């Protein structure tokens, strides 16, 4: 189980690195869109109407790509959340097993003369008081 936890943590870190790359790409797209908008503002409209139309197409393309980046980050974040929940579940299983082992060890120390089959009866009696 600890190997599974290590594998999940490694995959979660890789997903985080991927999310950072997508976020960096989105920032770069923001800069490109800003530069294209500035180019449109500086254009002389009667003469550069064809160039302005081409720049507007590029801006629409980059907006679409930016929306795709948001979707990818959402998907990656959801995968990271699922991995975190799986890790938590495995961690709880390990803790439960540790608790059972500790309980059995303490039972051997406290009740060495009681056979294992009768130990449950002793536990029930202790719970009553």
Image: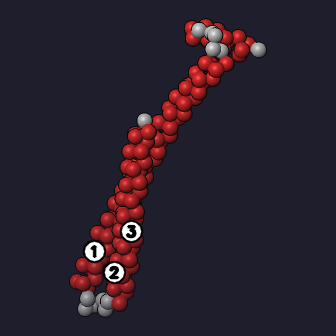
Image location (x, y in percent) of residue 90: 47, 36
Q: Is residue 25 above or below residue 93?
A: below
Circle number at residue 32: none
Q: Name which of mark 1 and mark 3 comes first in the sequence.
A: 3
Q: Within 10 Å of the Cα at label 3, are there few (<14), some (14-19), or many (20+) other Cα atoms?
A: few
Which of 81/99 is in front? 99
- Placement of 26 over or under 16, stated as above or below: below
Which quadrant does the C terminus fall into?
A: top right
> Which residue is most to the right?
129
Return the residue nearer the eye: 44 or 108: 108
Under circle 3, the secondary element is helix
Residue at the spot of label 2: 36
C-alpha span from label 2 to label 3: 19 Å
> Does residue 16 appear left or right of residue 43 in this picture?
right
Residue at 50 percent across and 33 percent down: it is 94
Q: Residue at x 63, y 14 (%)?
A: 112
- Separation of marks 2 and 1 at Cα, in angstroms: 8 Å
> Which residue position is annotated with label 1?
58
Tell which circle, 2 or 1, labels the residue nearer the N-terminal end: 2
Look at the numbered disc 1 and give the secondary structure of its residue: helix
x, y percentage for residue 99?
Answer: 58, 29
Measured from the top left, where is residue 37 in percent x and y? 37, 81
Checking the image for residue 24, the label placed there is 3
Q: Nearer the viewer, mark 1 or mark 3?
A: 3
């Amino acid at each position: 189980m600890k190997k599974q936890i290590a594998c999940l943590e490694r995959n979660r870190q890789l997903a985080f690195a991927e999310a950072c790359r997508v976020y960096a790409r989105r920032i770069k797209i923001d800069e490109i869109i800003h530069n294209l908008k500035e180019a449109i503002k500086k254009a002389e409209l009667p003469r550069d109407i064809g160039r302005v139309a081409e720049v507007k197409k590029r801006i629409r393309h980059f907006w679409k790509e930016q929306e795709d980046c948001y979707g990818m980050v959402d998907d990656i974040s959801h995968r990271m959340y699922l991995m975190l929940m799986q890790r938590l579940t495995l961690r709880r299983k390990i803790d439960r097993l540790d608790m059972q082992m500790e309980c059995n060890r303490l039972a051997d120390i406290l009740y060495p003369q009681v056979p294992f089959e009768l130990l449950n009866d002793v536990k029930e009696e202790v719970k009553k008081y």
